[in-house]
Amino acid sequence: MSLKLVELSKNFGGVIASSAVNIEVPKGQITGLIGPNGAGKTTIVNMITGMLSVSSGTITVEGRDITRASADQICRAGLARTFQNIRILPENSVLENILIGFHRHETCSTLSALLNLPASQKETRAIRSKANELLKRFDMSHFGDYPAGKLSYGHQRKVEMMRALASEPDYILLDEPIAGMNDVESESLADLFLELARNGRGILLIEHNIRFVSKLCERIYVLDGGRLISEGPPADVLRDPAVITAYLGGDHA
């Protein structure tokens, strides 16, 4: 079972942002996607999650074609993401931001909620309990009522991750999740990501910190100029002359 990209391409007029990219993200593993600035990593994530249309190629989740699906349909298919540029509701509390992520699992009608019927009350209690569990898991219980916009950059990233996990996705796409975090915070998240993978989730990790990616990932894909230039186990990929050249420039073989 996996998330698969087959010959995935994106063109903006005459500009090729992604060209015939093939990536597989199996369940139960952390898969890395790296590349220099402007390589096309976020373009790939935006196509997977329906924020950008696909020029050609296919995206499937466990055999189900989601290439032309809406963002909502993709979420319901079991995918969630975080963003390179943080997207939270700054005036709302941390808890309120996390609660938004649970909408996929809400079963009570809007009328039931407006009338505050017992079924709606029960569902609300259950969702808030799960949100508090996420806060505890990320060591942020003391920030539950705090305005999200007043948190440090690293803590805001955690809010985004909690909101993504609230939908209980089968696959989660993490776009530079440790940006703005210190080593202690990064190590804590590394343990959490490994736990998520052990529990059966598929994780696509997009990150500039190559040491962090190579430590967590069983397989790494490398983009440069929208094209896949290398893939394989971290030790092999990081020795690839094409990868060294992409990051450092010139001939470093």
Image (cartoon, rainbow, N blue to C red):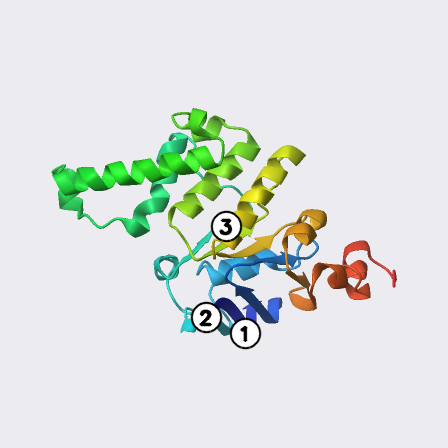
Q: Give the labeled residue for mark 3.
A: 196
Q: Give the labeled residue for mark 2.
A: 60
User: Which circle, 1 or 3, is nearer the viewer?
Assistant: 3
The amino acid type found where label 3 is placed reads Leu
Look at the image and tell me in which quarter the C terminus lies: bottom right
| Count of picture labels | 3
Tag 1 and tag 3, C-beta contact below 8 Å = no
In the foreground, 118 or 53:
118
Tag 2 and tag 1, C-beta contact below 8 Å = yes
Quarter assignment of residue 177: top right
Can the viewer see residue 182? no
Instruction: Report the Cα–Cα distance between label 2 and label 1.
Output: 8 Å
Which residue is found at the position 50% from the left and 62% from the top?
Answer: 27
Q: Categorize mark 1 by other alpha carbons within 10 Å: few (<14), some (14-19), many (20+).
A: some
Q: Secondary structure at mark 2?
A: strand
Left or right of 252? Residue 94 is left
Q: Give the labeled residue for mark 1.
A: 6
Which residue is found at the position 41% from the left and 54% from the top?
Answer: 169
Which residue is found at the position 62% from the left and 57% from the top?
Answer: 32
Q: Which mark is residue 200?
A: none
Instruction: Report the Cα–Cα distance between label 1 and label 3.
Output: 25 Å
Q: Secondary structure at mark 3?
A: helix
Expressed as whole percent of the image width and height from the top left, the position of residue 79 reads 43, 57
